[in-house]
Image (cartoon, grey):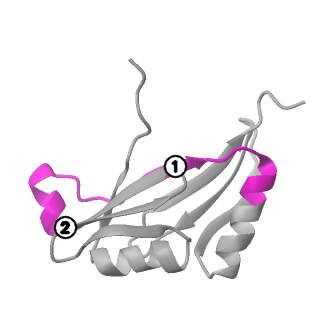
Amino acid sequence: MTFPAPVPEIPAANVDKAAAYYVNTLGFTFDWGDDQGGIAGISGGNCRLFITNRSFREPYGNISAILFWLNLNSKAEVDELFAQWKAANAKIVSGPEDKPWKLREFIVADLDGNLIRVFNDFRGAT
């Protein structure tokens, strides 16, 4: 069996406000949902995310902020996305850097303190 791409569930105080940040600042597309229903879907390329409010998550106990990773195809893509998000006033936590573990990465935060680590694995690069 081949596993599909995971769909992270992003905790938010307000689904509508969080979705607006992901769409207007980070460039995702709003697909469906709202704060009243407690869940929304957003996407960008092959990436899908669900944003959920506290009342949606509470029965499952997953109420803390999370960190998820976005794996890009090259160092250049990492730098390009960083420039786009910085220009859009994303909440930058750390800028692009080649790490000793052979990942080029940067980190941004959303309105609720969730972190997005964007990276490229360059271990096989020559």
- 10 shown above or below 92: above
> Looking at the picture, how far across and down is residue 115, in whole percent?
49, 60
In this view of the protein, can residue 66 be seen by the observer? Answer: no
In this view of the protein, can residue 86 be seen by the observer? Answer: yes
The local secondary structure at tag 1 comes to loop
Q: Which mark is residue 81?
A: none
Chain-order first, disc 2 or disc 1? 1
> Looking at the picture, how far across and down is residue 47, in whole percent?
49, 52
Query: In the image, what residue occupies the spot 68% across and 76% down?
Result: 86
Query: In the image, what residue occupies the spot 15% across and 62% down?
Result: 56
- Give the labeled residue for mark 1: 46
Q: Is residue 24 left or right of residue 71?
A: left
> Looking at the picture, how far across and down is residue 46, in whole percent?
52, 49
> Looking at the picture, how far across and down is residue 98, in whole percent?
78, 47
| Numbered range of the magenta stretch | 55-79
Q: Amino acid at mark 2?
A: Arg
Quadrant holding the C terminus: top right
Quarter-wise, where is residue 88 in the image?
A: bottom right
Distance between the alpha carbons at the discs numbered 2 and 1: 26 Å
Of circles 2 and 1, the one toward us is: 1
Q: Give the total number of marks visible in the rendering.
A: 2
Query: In the image, what residue occupies the spot 13% across and 59% down?
Result: 58
- 92 shown above or below 114: below
- 70 shown above or below 13: above
Out of 97 and 35, give the one closest to the viewer. 35
The local secondary structure at tag 2 comes to helix
Out of 90 and 49, give the one closest to the viewer. 49
Residue at the left extreme?
A: 59
- Give the labeled residue for mark 2: 54
Q: Residues within 10 Å of mark 1 (few under 14, many from 20)?
A: few
Q: Is residue 77 magenta?
A: yes
Q: Amino acid at mark 1?
A: Asn
